[in-house]
Image: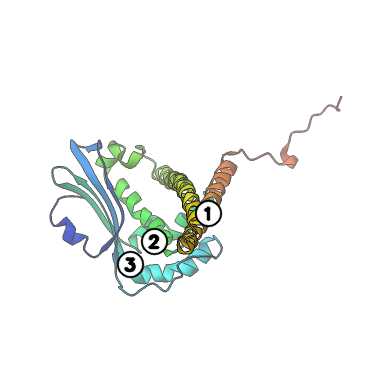
Amino acid sequence: MKMKCRNIARMFSTLIVLGFTTLFGFRANSQTVNTFIEAIEVKSPKPSTTPDTYTGSQTVKALMNAFDTAYNQKYSKARVMALCEDGIVYSSELAVSGEIDARYSRVEWLQMLLQRGITIENFDDYRIYLSKRHTLAFLEDNPDLQEIGFLDMPLMDDREAYKVVYINKLVHDKVQKSLKQVERLKTQIERGEKQLERAKRQSNLKQLNQAQTKLANAKKQLEETRKRLKRVEEVLERRQKPTPPSQDLKKRSPYPPL
């Protein structure tokens, strides 16, 4: 949906912004898209009762049992916007259940992510990945943005294929963010080790304890991030390998072996 840009800040006053990106070089019908926003509206201000860290199994059923009730109770709708330089706004707004679920089943959506190695570790991960359905709907409903390959999405007539490409892009983006996080953590660990040595030389017990704690946390985060990356890479590698033919289906030669 197109509209003129009016009171954008007020429109987003009750929303949690999930993604905010300033973009350059994308043009839709001679309109330059400057800013892209993904947000979700809070229905209930009550704090979530879901745990900070999810340690259950990475299955659709387990994840929905852990998070789905809280997701439905806490959020009402998601809004996606692309703001152009001359005030034109491309906008989409859908409830977190109902129409969006009819377009992209939660079960199927989560299954496609899990099959590609995505790990959902907490409630924030759950709400963000479910809300990405709204961005896909936004892209499908705005042909002008599809024409210019907005968000690096190709122009495709087949909606099912378009959805698969979009899911794969989510996985790719997650991998790239994890790789950057690995580099940041490695730098943080190097810096922490230097601080630790300095604290030892100065016999500063307080700084020594602080440096040890920060270093241990950084190493733990690095290990967890690498594990997630490895899981995604292994899953993607398995998906790319051709399935070997069944032994029962192999064609037998009518001639005896030499």
Q: Residues within 10 Å of mark 2 (few under 14, many from 20)?
A: many
Viewer-closest of 203 and 223: 203
Quadrant occupied by the C terminus? top right
Q: Amino acid at mark 1?
A: Lys
The residue tagged 3 is: 75
Residue 42, position as x, y percentages in the image: 29, 67
The answer to whether residue 247 is above or below residue 71 is above
Q: Which residue corresponds to the image point at 33% horizontal and 67% vertical from the top-left?
A: 75
Question: How far apart are the two marked residues, 3 and 2, measured between alpha carbons?
Answer: 9 Å
User: Which residue is painted at 56% across and 49% down in the image?
Assistant: 231
Residue 25, position as x, y percentages in the image? 25, 35
SS class of the residue under badge 1?
Answer: helix
Q: Do labels 2 and 1 touch, CB within 8 Å?
A: no
**Rendering coords of residue 66 (x, y %):** 48, 69
Type of amino acid under label 3: Tyr
Say the numbered circle drawn on residue 6.
none
Q: CA distance from mark 2 to mark 1?
A: 27 Å
Coordinates of residue 109 in the picture (x, y in percent): 45, 55
User: Disc 1 and disc 3: Cα gap in Å?
Assistant: 35 Å
Observer-nearest residue: 52 or 71?
52
Which circle marks residue 127 in the picture?
2
Total numbered labels placed on residues in the image: 3
The answer to whether residue 112 is seen in the rendering is: no
The secondary structure type at the circle numbered 3 is: strand
Label 1, on which residue? 219
Which amino acid lies under the numbered mark 2 shown in the image of this protein?
Arg
Which residue is at the front of the view, 107 or 237?
Answer: 237
